[in-house]
Image (spheres, grey):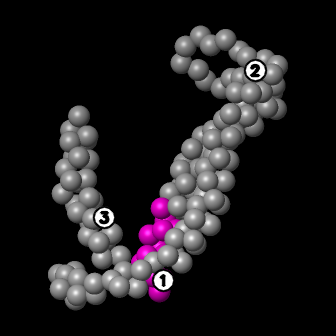
Amino acid sequence: MLLGVLVLIINEKWYLPFINWYVSTVHCHTPFGYSGISVMWYSIFVGLPLFGAFIIGVFSIPIGCKGLMHKQFPPKGMKVYKPTKILRGWRGNVKSIFFLLIPISLILFSVWGYFQATDLLQKVPNDFDYSVCENHPLY
């Protein structure tokens, strides 16, 4: 509970104010020499789904592959927390494929997001208020 309160305080005190500040002044930034707007769009539409696919895929891809190789779910040697009925045949394959489809769908979503971010960069308005960039204390 103490860790949860600490995360909440960090979120409210530093993280959300930083994100709000960055989004309101995104046109002022050039991280790594790229436009701040393009970094924001690509990180939202491509980076976040790829990060999620990596985090989920580390755990689900080996389970799905082992399930398909052993033709059962849960695969042989997988630890379960309670007595679990072993699914064989098409039901075991469907469950194993489902474990593989989660990260694959996130990767496909990031490919779709790449094209969406590219389209959104073509629609960026040119009338930004650059006075915000000069008056902020972090510059």
20 left or right of 54 in image: left
Q: Nearer the viewer, residue 81 or 134?
A: 134
| Residue identified by numbered label 3 | 19
- At label 1, counting other C-alpha atoms closer than 10 Å, the crowd grade (few under 14, some 14-19, many 20 or more) is few
x 48%, y 68%: residue: 41
* Cα–Cα gap, marks 3 and 1: 18 Å
Question: Residue at 66% of width from left, 53% of height from top?
Answer: 108
Looking at the picture, how far across and down is residue 82, in whole percent? 55, 13
Question: Residue 102 placed where, x, y %?
Answer: 63, 41
Q: Which quarter of the rendered picture does the N terminus lie within? A: top left
Q: Is residue 96 above or below residue 135?
A: above
Q: Per the image, is 36 magenta? A: yes
Q: Amino acid at mark 1?
A: Tyr
Q: Please name the residue shown 57% across and 65% down the image.
A: 116
Magenta stretch bounds: 29-44
Residue at which label 2 appears: 91
Label 2 sits on a secondary structure element that is helix
Q: Magenta region's main secondary structure?
A: helix
Seen in the image, is 27 located left or right of residue 21? right
Q: Secondary structure at mark 1?
A: loop
Q: Quadrant of residue 139?
A: bottom left
Q: Nearer the viewer, residue 115 or 135?
A: 115
| Numbered tag placed on residue 34 in the rendering | 1
Residue 94 occupies quadrant:
top right
